[in-house]
Amino acid sequence: MSGFWDSTKNKVSRAGTNLRMGGGGAAAVLDPEYNEQEQRFRNLEKRAMKLLQETKDYRGSISTMTNSQRMLSQNLSAFLLDVQRPQDYQAAYRQAAQTIDQVSQPQFDEVYMHTVLQPMAQFCGYLPEFNKAMKKRKGLADDLERARRQLSKEQAKAAADPMAIEKAEMDVQYAEEAYTVMNRTLVGEIPKLINSRVYVVDPSFEAFVKAQLQFFNDSLQQMDGVTRYLPPPGGPDDDRMLDQRIGDVMAQVRSLTICSQNVV
């Protein structure tokens, strides 16, 4: 895969080497085939950069989640520090959250970086090369238009200078050749770049799913160790009974003198 990238980058770069850049030219808008490919590239570029940002955001969200879970477990223990009958689930949950954050998450992160984020970043890293080539193409279009105008001026002179006309014709020929090479390179290489996204996304997505599965299985295994300290599930009435227990406790809190005085 790296061979394709290097070949594509070299072709696009060589096509515009040592050629002066400029603004847009008339020739740049008279090639429907190129215009179509450029529009396809712009669509790809927009979607690729968005996907890259989302892969970065996902990585950050996993790290934030596991870190928040670990901090929550520590604060839960601190909140109940002086309870006379500490619950075993506190220590079990704290240990599980710590293992997930300090073992499972780094393992997931390493795999995710190598198989998902880095390949996507590498793919997006080649997009600026195509943008540079497109700018060079615009410059070459300007060069070609200027050369043609100069040739027309020389030919229109009353006392035409054959040597000046010959030089102007050579300038037009050189400009046409340079523009044609760059234009042909872009028209040929942009579809290859667009098609190659499949060979980046397919293996990365497969690795992404497997990494997720491993991470969540590891997390589930850690949390399973906590459930043995909790009451066994009692069926459909569990939620109702839990709500009742919480309601009873909150009623006791509301019955405290301070809570019943509506202090302003």
Image: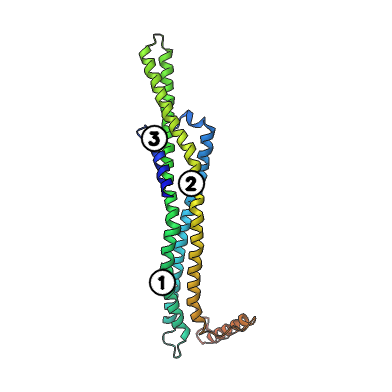
Instruction: Look at the numbered disc 1 and give the secondary structure of its residue.
Output: helix
Q: Position of residue 29 (x, y in %)?
A: 50, 31
Q: Earlier in the sequence, mark 3 or mark 2?
A: 3
Query: Tag 2: Cα neighbours inside 10 Å, few (<14), some, or many (≥20)?
Result: some
Mark 2–mark 1 contact, CB under 8 Å? no
**Res 171 seen here:** yes
Residue 198 marker:
none
Residue 33 lies left or right of residue 127; in this view the side is right
Residue placed most toward the observer, 211 or 168: 211
Residue at (46%, 64%) from the top-left corner?
61
Kindly identify which residue carries mark 1.
103
Instruction: Look at the numbered disc 2 and give the secondary structure of its residue.
Output: helix
Amino acid at circle 1: Val
Residue 146 lies left or right of residue 262; in this view the side is left
Kindly identify which residue carries mark 3.
16
Q: CA distance from mark 2 to mark 1?
A: 36 Å
Q: Earlier in the sequence, mark 2 or mark 1?
A: 2
**Res 75 seen here:** no
Note whether 59 is above or below 9 in the view shown: below
Q: Earlier in the sequence, mark 3 or mark 1?
A: 3
Residue at (46%, 79%) from the top-left corner?
93
Colouring: rainbow
Q: Position of residue 46 (x, y in %)?
A: 50, 47
- Image quadrant in which you'd find residue 163: top left
Residue placed most toward the observer, 180 or 134: 180
Amino acid at circle 2: Glu
Query: Tag 3: Cα neighbours inside 10 Å, few (<14), some, or many (≥20)?
Result: many
Note whether 144 is above or below 133 in the view shown: above
Amino acid at circle 3: Gly
Note whether 149 is above or below 226 in the view shown: above
Kindly identify which residue carries mark 2.
45
